[in-house]
Amino acid sequence: MVNLEKWNAMPTYIKMLNIGSEVSRTIKYHEEKSQYAEISLFRVLEMIDITTVKGFSGNWELCRVRELICDLVINGNTANNSGLKSYFNYFGMTRV
């Protein structure tokens, strides 16, 4: 469970880095066919759900990430893995 008080106190780019880290972990676990892929997926979904709030301009992007990561784990569609990783790498490079 994510601590809501701490999560809401974080700047958006830090939240995105945390989500990106968990997305990368989910992709890695899925590629390894690990039992932890589903657990990691649920954590990503939780982070996305508590980040998407009324008035946040990036909601549509987070919803698309949510859709793609679910498609990966549930349907095995790996076509967007590199795109997901690249998307979150951007946040790491912009705020150092």
Image (cartoon, rainbow, N blue to C red):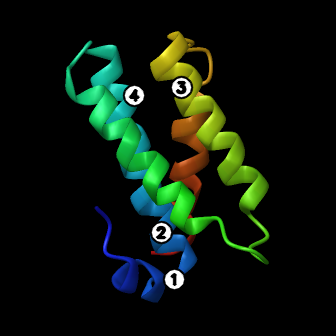
Mark 3–mark 2 Cα distance, whole angstroms, equals: 20 Å
Q: Amino acid at mark 2?
A: Lys
SS category of the residue bearing label 2: helix
> Circle 1: is it few (<14), some (14-19), or many (20+) Cα within 10 Å?
few
Q: Amino acid at mark 4?
A: Ile
Report the residue marked by disc 4.
27
SS category of the residue bearing label 1: loop
Report the residue marked by disc 1.
11
Q: Is residue 77 above or below residue 35?
A: above
Mark 3–mark 4 Cα distance, whole angstroms, equals: 7 Å
SS category of the residue bearing label 3: helix
Marks 3,2: beta carbons within 8 A: no
Mark 1–mark 2 Cα distance, whole angstroms, equals: 7 Å
Q: Is residue 61 above or below residue 67?
A: below
> Circle 3: is it few (<14), some (14-19), or many (20+) Cα within 10 Å?
some
**Mark 3 or mark 1, which has the lower sequence index?**
1
Report the residue marked by disc 3.
81
Marks 1,2: beta carbons within 8 A: yes
Q: Position of residue 60 (x, y in %)?
A: 78, 53
